Amino acid sequence: MDTLTINIKSKLAYEKIKELEDMNLIHIAYASNSYVLNGEPLAIVEFNQWLSQSEQSSKLSINEFKQRWLGKKKEIFE
């Protein structure tokens, strides 16, 4: 088995590759579910998935974040 990295430039191309996966001819492997500072560009499909996941995740106010950070900061640095 070989691993190949490709850039998909259209939705049609992605759909064709997805069809190959659905027929169990290939497996689409994602390197990471985290897009923070990994240095890799995102495909439009990946960006849309990330955006959808982000919109459905829980929200946090800035004040609550600051309070949590103060507690975590004490754990880490003291």
Image: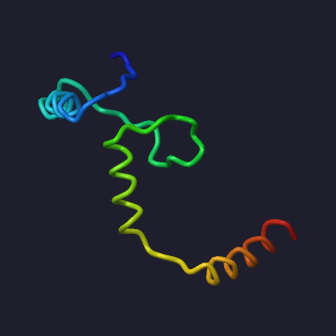
Examine the rendered structure and indicate whether residue 47 appears above or below residue 1. Answer: below
Q: What residue sits 74% from the left and 78% below the top?
A: 71
* In the image, farthest residue toward the top: 2
Q: Whole-percent x and y of residue 23?
A: 12, 30
The quarter of the picture where the C terminus appears is bottom right
Asked where in the image residue 53 lies, by quadrant, the reply is bottom left
Q: How many marks?
A: 0
- Residue at image coords 53%, 77%: 60
Q: Is residue 67 left or right of residue 16?
A: right
Scheme of image coloration: rainbow
Residue 45 versus residue 74: which sits nearer the camera? Answer: 45
Image coords of residue 2 (percent x, y): 36, 16
Q: Nearer the viewer, residue 61 or 24?
A: 61
Q: Is residue 6 above or below residue 35?
A: above
Residue drawn where x is 14% and y is 31% of the image: 19
Quadrant for the N terminus in the image: top left
x 69%, y 78%: residue: 66
Q: Position of residue 30 (x, y in %)?
A: 39, 37
